[in-house]
Image: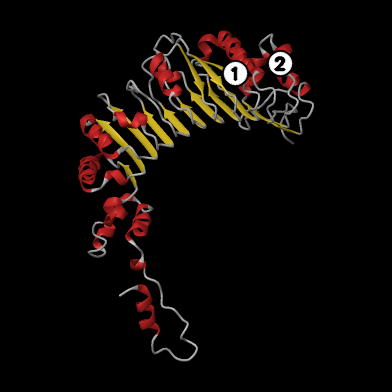
């Protein structure tokens, strides 16, 4: 019986004035393809539980387009591992558009490799992997690196990121890499050169010690966020780590953020379109070992970035950034920031008004409208 006949039957016998009142619409009247979209919006375990609703719903969840998996307490580990393995067998992975996995790999690298090869299909659109406790190398399916539909890729993995001979993310727009180790310069360059449509790039505590230099360029790149911390990579003698030289070609770059301790060298080229920038240089824990040397090098680091941002409209800096910049002899070479309207400093640390770099920035910003900072006064104890 079709939907229209059902409605007529349910309306029959109603009193005067009630003939145009339609019955409530049941979710079961929706076609399978719509129900699968609804089920896909649920958390994965709840989506699977819909199979008990009726015979019709028993297999609907198998074609869901989104799967999100996250391990729990250590004592529940084996239960989680068995659940994911059974899920891989039961569902139709060819329908997956979004896949997310957070997992402690431990000694089960072979099983996780099996999951990656099974769940990551050639039509995947969004992929989020947070893999930790890795003891053996993980193997990603080659089809991932030539996927023509992938638009968002997030990878958090404190391990070598080994790449195949061919890398081409044709439609990748957002790339987030956290804690990964680049094995060499060629693989790093191969990855960044294989993202022609990249718009947003996030590099969070990535290990570039094995990379001498790399160029990051995408004609559509509009935002880049870099955060790095050298402390976790130092040996007991605080030996210096040779930094990587990173060239960022920003022909369309609008936003640039750096947050770290100047571990690597960054060079912005053709970045005149950047209007929103943040330079948050922070002292590392070993700061006391080479205080003067680190201040000079980080001051030059800040100067180099500022010189590449002549058209910035909003600029945020840390107290350390402005302090180390003041230690250099390069202040006279800072450009005129004719478009700078907002200048702000870290609200959790105080700024000395006598910093030469601060006075130079103010002098070189004729259109400045907003200045935000915290200053410690020395008027004695409060009355």
- The residue labelled by disc 1 is 269
Q: Position of residue 320 (x, y in %)?
A: 61, 21
Give the left or right position of residue 125, taking residue 303 as reference.
left
Residue furthest bottom in the image: 16
Is residue 221 placed above or below 237 in the rendered structure?
A: below
**Neighbourhood count class around disc 1 (C-alpha, 10 Å): few under 14, some 14–19, many 20 upward:** some
Q: Nearer the viewer, mark 1 or mark 2?
A: 1
**Neighbourhood count class around disc 2 (C-alpha, 10 Å): few under 14, some 14–19, many 20 upward:** some
Q: Nearer the viewer, residue 131 or 53?
A: 53
Disc nearer the start of the sequence (1/2): 1
Q: Position of residue 76 (x, y in %)?
A: 24, 43
On-image quarter of the C terminus: top right
Q: Residue at x 23, y 29 (%)?
A: 109
Q: Which mark is residue 334?
A: 2
Q: Residue at x 38, y 21 (%)?
A: 181
Q: Position of residue 217 (x, y in %)?
A: 52, 22
Q: Nearer the viewer, residue 311 or 16?
A: 16
Q: CA distance from mark 1 to mark 2?
A: 16 Å
């Amino acid at each position: 019986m079709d939907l229209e006949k059902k409605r007529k039957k349910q309306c029959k016998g109603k009193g005067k004035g009630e003939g145009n009142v339609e019955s409530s619409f049941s979710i079961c009247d929706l076609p399978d393809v719509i129900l699968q979209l609804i089920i896909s919006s649920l958390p994965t375990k709840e989506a699977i539980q819909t199979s008990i609703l009726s015979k019709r719903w028993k297999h609907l969840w198998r074609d869901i387009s989104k799967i999100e998996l996250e391990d729990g307490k250590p004592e529940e580990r084996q239960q989680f591992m068995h659940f994911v393995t059974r899920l891989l067998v039961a569902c139709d992975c060819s329908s997956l558009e979004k896949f997310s996995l957070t997992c402690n790999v431990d000694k089960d690298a072979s099983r996780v490799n099996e999951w990656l090869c099974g769940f990551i299909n050639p039509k995947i659109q969004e992929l989020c992997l947070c893999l930790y406790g890795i003891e053996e190398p993980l193997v990603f399916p080659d089809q991932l690196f030539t996927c023509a539909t992938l638009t968002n890729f997030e990878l958090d993995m404190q391990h070598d990121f080994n790449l195949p001979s061919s890398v081409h993310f044709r439609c990748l727009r957002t790339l987030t890499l956290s804690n990964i180790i680049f094995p060499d310069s060629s693989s790093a360059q191969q990855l960044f050169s294989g993202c022609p449509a990249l718009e947003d790039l996030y590099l969070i505590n990535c290990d570039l010690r094995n990379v001498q230099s790399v160029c990051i360029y995408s004609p559509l790149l509009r935002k880049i966020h870099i955060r790095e911390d050298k402390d976790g990579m130092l040996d007991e003698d605080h030996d210096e780590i040779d930094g990587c030289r990173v060239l960022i070609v920003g022909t369309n770059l609008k936003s640039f953020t750096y947050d770290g301790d100047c571990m690597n060298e960054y060079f912005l080229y053709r970045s005149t379109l950047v209007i929103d920038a943040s330079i948050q240089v922070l002292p590392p824990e070993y700061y006391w070992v080479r205080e003067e040397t680190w201040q000079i090098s980080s001051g030059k680091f800040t100067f180099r970035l500022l010189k590449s941002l002549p058209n910035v409209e909003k600029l945020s800096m840390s107290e350390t950034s402005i302090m180390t910049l003041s230690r250099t002899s390069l202040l006279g070479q800072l450009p005129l920031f004719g478009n700078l309207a907002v200048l702000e400093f870290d609200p959790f640390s105080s700024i000395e008004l006598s910093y030469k770099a601060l006075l130079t920035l103010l002098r070189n910003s004729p259109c400045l409208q907003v200045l935000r900072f915290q200053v410690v006064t020395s008027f004695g104890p409060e009355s």
